[in-house]
């Protein structure tokens, strides 16, 4: 699998950190065109509306994407109670780590893309 190249500038942005932590989690494949065709690193844009419009996401995948969108910017509001009640334990941990990535500038999760970039 090709290593994902993300600029250090994006990795310092709380919204990008949180969103990337979710969309690079095991819930999503790194070669899934439904997702990655709507990610523009150079333009610093994630088009979550277009990602979700693909319409073929499972209910938990869609919840994770909405959570990532909510952490990325304020265009999507989510009910966290509703989200975590549907997620698996691993997905809930991913979401909690993503929230920490957004809230704490120096937080490094124990797994995932941000952990890989730190080591």
Image (spheres, rainbow, N blue to C red):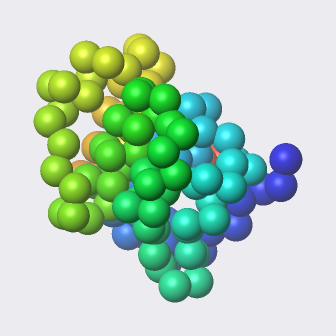
Tell whether 61 sits left or right of 79.
right
Tell whether 93 sits left or right of 117.
left
Count of marks, rendered view: 0
Q: Nearer the viewer, residue 87 or 112?
A: 87
Q: Nearer the viewer, residue 106 or 63?
A: 63
Q: Residue at x 47, y 20 (%)?
A: 90
Q: Nearer the viewer, residue 11 or 95?
A: 95
On screen, residue 84 above or below 49 = above
Q: Position of residue 4 (x, y in %)?
A: 71, 59
Q: Position of residue 50 (x, y in %)?
A: 45, 62
Q: Residue at x 49, y 29 (%)?
A: 58
The residue furthest right is 1
On screen, residue 78 above or below 10 = above
Q: Position of residue 60 (x, y in %)?
A: 42, 27
Tell whether 2 sits left or right of 86.
right
**Quarter-of-image position of residue 92:** top left
Q: Residue at x 54, y 39 (%)?
A: 56
Q: Position of residue 2 (x, y in %)?
A: 83, 55
Q: Is residue 110 visible?
A: no
Q: Residue at x 61, y 53 (%)?
A: 34
């Amino acid at each position: 699998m090709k290593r994902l190249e993300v600029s250090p500038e994006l990795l310092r942005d709380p919204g990008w950190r949180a969103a990337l932590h979710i969309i690079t989690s095991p819930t999503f494949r790194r070669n899934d065109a439904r997702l990655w065709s709507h990610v523009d690193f150079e333009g610093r844009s994630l088009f979550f509306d277009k990602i979700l419009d693909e319409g073929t996401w499972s209910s938990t995948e869609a919840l994770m994407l909405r959570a990532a969108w909510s952490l990325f910017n304020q265009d999507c509001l989510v009910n966290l109670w509703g989200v975590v009640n549907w997620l698996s334990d691993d997905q809930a941990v991913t979401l909690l780590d993503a929230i920490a990535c957004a809230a704490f500038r120096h937080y490094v999760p124990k797994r995932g893309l941000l952990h890989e970039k730190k080591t």
